[in-house]
Image: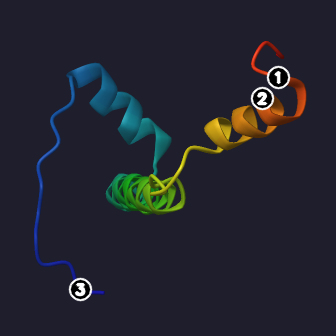
Amino acid sequence: MPYEEAILVKVDRVTKRKMKLAEENWSELIRMFIQRELDKKRNIAKAERLRAKLFRTVKGKDSTAIIREMRDSRYGPASS
């Protein structure tokens, strides 16, 4: 994938020296980190949409009210 955009990351001198000593491909590591973070955010958004869909409010009578009515009809209004 050709890279078309650039970003600038500023670090202090000590960090820069440590990075140079580590001899890593920092550009690639930063690209991978950014991609992982974007994937996490996308997955969180997907999960939130799914959660909202699964737990949407159901229209109709409340199930606790139905259970209460059944118990009251069986045992009388004072039952718990």
Q: Residue at x 79, y 40 (%)?
A: 70
Element at label 1: loop
C-alpha distance separating marks 1 and 3: 75 Å
C-alpha distance separating marks 1 and 2: 4 Å
Find residue 72 and name its label: 2
Q: 59 and 23: which one is in front?
A: 59
Residue 64's image quarter?
Answer: top right
Tell whether 15 sits left or right of 25: left
Q: How many other residues sit within 10 Å of disc 2, few (<14), some (14-19) or many (≥20)? A: some
Whichever of callouts 1 and 3 sits on the residue coming sooner in the sequence is 3
Whichever of callouts 2 and 3 sits on the residue coming sooner in the sequence is 3
Placement of the C terminus among the 4 image quadrants: top right
Residue 38's image quarter?
Answer: bottom left
Horizontal and vertical percent for residue 42? 38, 61
Horizontal and vertical percent for residue 12? 21, 23
Q: Amino acid at mark 1?
A: Gly
Q: Residue at label 3?
A: 2
Q: Residue at label 1?
A: 76
